[in-house]
Amino acid sequence: MRYEAPEKLSEQRRNGDEPRVGVFVCHCGGNISDIVDVEKVVEQIRKRSGVACVTTHQFCCSDPGQAVIEQSIRERRLNRIVVAACSPSLHELTFRRAVARGGLNPYLFEHANIREHVSWVVDDRKEATAKAGRLIRAAVARAARLAPLEKRRIPIHPSVLVIGGGVAGLTAARDLANRGIRVRLIESTPFLGGRLAQLYKIYPTGQRARDVIGGLIREVSSNPLITVYTNAELVEARGFIGDFHTTIRLVPRGATERCTDAQAAINACPEETVDQFNLGLARRKAIYLPYKGCYPSIPAIDWRNCTRCGACLEAGGVGSIDLDEKPREIVIRSGAIVIAVGLNTYPPRYGEYGFGQFAEVITLAQMNRLLDPTGPTQGELVVNGRRIRRVGFMHCVGSLQHEGVHKPMRDGRINQYCSRVCCTTTMHTAVELKTRWPGVQVYDFHEDIRTYGRRHEGYYDKVCRQGVVFLRFDPLRPPRVGVDPKGEWPLVLRTVDRLTFGEELEVPLDLLVLATGLVARDMSKLVDLYRCSVGADRFLMEVHPKLRPVEMATFGLFLAGSVQGPMDIGESTAAAAAAASKAAALLKAGQIELDPFVAEVDTSKCSGCRICLQACPFAATDRDEAARTAKINQALCTGCGTCVASCPCNAIQQRGFRDDQVEAELLALLEAEEPVGV
Amino acid sequence: MNANGKLRMGVYWASSCGGCDISLLEIGDKILDLAQIADILFWPCVADFKYADVAGYLDGYLDLCFFNGGIRNSEQEQVVRLLRNKSRTLIAYGTCAADGGIPALANLYSSEEIFEASYHENPSIDNEAGVEPQPEVETAIGTLEIPRFYPAVLKLRDVVEVDYVIPGCPPQADDVWETIAALASGAVPVHAGDARIGCNNRSVCDECKREKREVKIKELHRHHEFRPEPGWCLLEQGLLCMGSATRGGCGALCPKVGMRCEGCYGPPPGATDQGASIMGALGALLDAGTEARAQEMVAEIADPTGTFYRFSLASSRLRVSSDRGGRR
């Protein structure tokens, strides 16, 4: 079998680049040498071709240890360095720097891990010595073929695009602008505020949600560094860290800034439709403002329900409404992107705890609208024309689902996770109920209660004192909702209570509130445009949940808030603030340095089959139409190697991980115990 | 070269189907031109030549030798070594000589398994006595020998040095004639260290006119159950077309008429293992979504070795393990 590896090496030799590998074996103060027979390893390695010298040191990473490396490079004309020591995650950078100080390109260095991979895990001295020898000769074989590499330096466009105008997006935009950074915020609906604007009061402060979001919106809208685009849809995304080009389509609002008498225009509209802002509990006109004090304060036309009759135009006055404006597309350039598109509440299926069958079964979000004095009932506790006296709360609707018990969602998956905010929201809502209407009887049906957050447990204590009745059901035998046979109450809930050791109970109610969980939005367009990684729970994935919690695998993309999973408002804003500071740190550097290990196309071998274009998870592969070959964007490439493996013509190679380098390493690793030369 | 200024040419077949010999005739009326520029000194398929004739030539006497087929037994090895000595330019002609070809698929089985199938199991076998060929048999007239059967099919360059390789099952007539003409005129060197000739330096995709829509494969299909949409890449439609992992030169003959490329020109330049090449590509192309679906899709591939390594098993990294390897 012909391997390319020896050819490359002979080519290298012809170019006068005869490898002179210097090997430095570290004792690590006994950490390695107590188990590995370092002297024996040295003897073995010394015999291998290409090795110019083998040196040992008590601590290679120490200043004297590094000095030995630097000095040897100069004195023995070494041109490749191998250090056999601890894990590269600990000291690879240390030794690369030492190699650079010695006058070599820092990428002419190879690290062999003989501590974590050998002395700390192998007990037998003979085995450990053999394994260390194997790893070092593999490193030598690879090192002999290394080529000098340069880091990539990419300039950063000094602005950020924030996608999403809810609490997380607004927070990120404000924080970035407060650092003097230009921000463009896009929101898909006509109004800012997101889900927070629909809430009544928020825990744990008890503030009115609208005051909180209103303050934040004022900060954002009054900051000259922030431009807000509402009714903005994502169309296309190009570019990479430092220079993203995002195309958005701006759907006309209908009403213009000259619309001074919005209410007259709204009143004149003959078309009525379901009021989404009030979650179907009220109706609104086709031209509307969702709530008093919303931003922008100019009404918007809901084009799906507008008949373009022109009634609003007459009532609103000259120039107030433009029914003929066409959507336009603009391109937003930015150095980084913050994704803050939020989430959805779980939509209960028809018949799930009577939802849809009975008007008296509503969601917790709808309950929030009912409690709001500016809401559809002006804050009166009236449902279906009936004043409410007995309320039940049902926990975990759409969360903590069980295989075989719950029907899967459309993608075939059930929601096994805890939605985290519903328990405290339920307790908080029960407190509000009992405080405003002490005579209302409240029942709480749960499988489990998790009021885990700081200052959240207080709500639980409080409802206990306020006389809320808790009933615990078996998740495998959830409560059933039916009609009252006596006709006295609209609903009867039948359940087996585990707190009273299996007592079967019938609880008559005139309102059942489903504490619906939180689910990811349909983000397929976003995921497709930015090649986001998506978790099994359908939320977007960060690089590392603990160490890099707001960064995405694609450089320059940051996650803010509940696009990442169920979060309460405090957690969302904390995540948004983190995303903002990460993005700001990136921008302030002006440029970034990236590892040089990118893939590159040998256009003489590329047949233009476009397979790599589909392989790349980061959209870094592109096509050179003129040459009919592939090309790779150096800034977008993360060096994952997927395209390298996918290329059927081997036309793509990854710098630092060329086939000949990896093959030489593997062959040396697998060769028989008696070494036969590199 | 002969005194009449003509090339001295030889043709031989080893472990192959015979199609390569016929493909030489496919050059059509150029056969008359061939007669103008070359004298055939050895071609057992078309005329009566003896090995002894060849053995009597001086070394390097033949200018040009087209050798088709891989090496399956000791006779074939003996002849190829002889022809190597007697030929100035030895050409591994056709895919069997180049990469083992279809006969090399037998490398998945031991000699015992092959004999079991060939002499006992196959339904058309009538062998009541259970006889198997023996390399040596004692008879009244002495010891009779037949060639020894090797445990694996070897490609030509596993046995001898080869000057050129013309891939294809069979090679395309136009390319064959061009190659002969180029060698006759001295346009190319007589030795080229097994360089491929009569083909392209890119994959079949490069010459295939079908449109790539950059969509992933939702479902795999086979020809008998699926009519592909004209003009659209067959692989993207779910047919396991080998074009992307196959050296071009045929003009994308099969994809042109709606058939998947079977990979007869072997791996493209730069790639060493055709099956690994296409499998790497499929990893990027299959739209499986879940692990279970991925396993399901892979399980749908009927005869993966025969699909991915149909023509190139002998040049792949799938080596015959050492207990079976090499020549006996």
Image: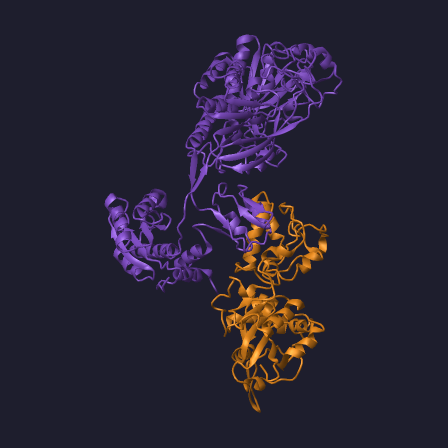
Tell me if I can see residue B211 in this picture: yes
Left or right: where A295 falls relative to A7: right
Rendered position, A7 above or below A119: below
Which of B101 and A313 lies nearest the eye of the viewer? A313
| Along the viewing direction, whichever of A666 and A5 lies nearer the viewer | A5
* Above or below, comparing residue A44 to residue A652 in the picture: below
Q: Position of residue A462 (x, y in %)?
A: 47, 14
Q: Where residue B38 sits in the image (x, y, percent)?
A: 63, 79
Which hue is chain A drawn in? Answer: purple
Q: Work out whether residue A2 or residue A282 is closer to the camera in this orientation and state it.
A: A2
> Which residue lies at the image location 55% right of the left edge and 8% below the top edge?
A436
Q: Is residue A509 visible?
A: no
The image shows residue A167, relative to residue A629, as above or below, that is above
Q: Horizontal placement of B282 versus A179: left or right?
A: right
Rendering quarter of residue B215: top right
Q: For the image shown, how many numbered marks are present on the structure?
A: 0
Looking at the image, the residue that sits furthest to the bottom is: B141
**Quarter placement of the C terminus of chain A:** bottom left
Scheme by which the image is coloured: by chain
Q: Colour of chain B?
A: orange
Residue A124 or A107: which is nearer the viewer?
Answer: A107
Where in the figure is residue B286, as x and y percent of width and height?
60, 48
> Is residue A407 found left or right of A656 in the rendered image?
right
Q: Quadrant of residue B117?
A: bottom right
Q: Residue at x 62, y 62 (%)?
A: B249
Residue A459: x %, y % from top left: 48, 16
Quadrant assignment, res B72:
bottom right
